[in-house]
Image: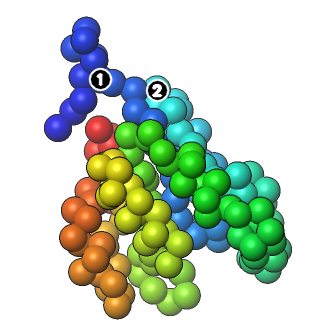
Amino acid sequence: MRQLNELGLQKEMKIVIAGSMQFADQMMEWKHQLEQLGHQAEVSMETAKMAGKTDEEKEAIKLELKFNQDAIKHFWQRMDGADALLVLNYDKRGIKNYIGGNTLMDMAMAYFWEQKIFLLNPIPEMLYSSEIIAMKPTVINGDDKLIE
């Protein structure tokens, strides 16, 4: 259902983008795309640092930020008060539409805060697929017009 403001126009949403840091470049692209649609888009503090890096460089930066700068807590602080979470679940590690442990935790926080959860691609076949299904995400299949 489309959210409308008091003038009957589509409401701007605050949307936080989550996913594997291997997808940092795509996160920055989606941030720009959502902003062009009039939404406020947020990414983690580490995303800009990861963009343009190799997978090996991203892994080293990710570990530093998680363990020494409390990146998980900082990301959840960005999520607090958001309208929605957009999960960029691209293929990774041979798993179609991968959703990793941190992203699953992000989804659980969004679910707890009663935020809308959007998945870029269909729900992956993983050990915790039933938990993802239980959060009732909306699969947008890459179509930003379905984010409402």
Q: Would you place residue 102 above or below residue 78 in this image? A: below
Label 2 crowd bin: few (<14), some (14–19), many (20+), radius 10 Å: some
Q: Would you place residue 24 above or below residue 123 in this image? A: above
Quadrant assignment for the C terminus: top left
Residue on which disc 2 sits: 38
- Residue extending furthest toward the left: 1
Near-viewer residue (32 or 111): 111
- Residue 34: where, in percent of width, then height? 49, 38
The amino acid sitting under disc 1 is: Gln
- Say if mark 2 contacts mark 1, CB within 8 Å: yes
Q: Is residue 100 left or right of residue 142?
A: right
Say how many tags the image has: 2
What's the residue at 46%, 26% (across, down)? 38
The amino acid sitting under disc 2 is: Gly
Quadrant assignment for the N terminus: top left
The disc label shown at residue 10, or none? 1
Q: In this view, does 128 lie to the left or right of 80?
A: left
Q: Is residue 135 left or right of residue 41?
A: left
Secondary element under disc 1, as helix, strand or loop, is loop
First reached walking from the N terminus: tag 2 or tag 1? 1
- Residue 130: where, in percent of width, then height? 24, 80
What's the residue at 58%, 39% (across, down)? 32
Near-viewer residue (25 or 45): 45
What's the residue at 23%, 72% (across, down)? 133
Q: Could you tell me if residue 51 is visible in this image?
A: no
Q: Would you place residue 115 above or below residue 100 in this image? A: above
- Residue 77: where, in percent of width, then height? 57, 49
Q: Would you place residue 12 above or below residue 114 in this image? A: above
The disc label shown at residue 35, or none? none
What's the residue at 50%, 48% (across, down)? 79
Secondary element under disc 2, as helix, strand or loop, is loop
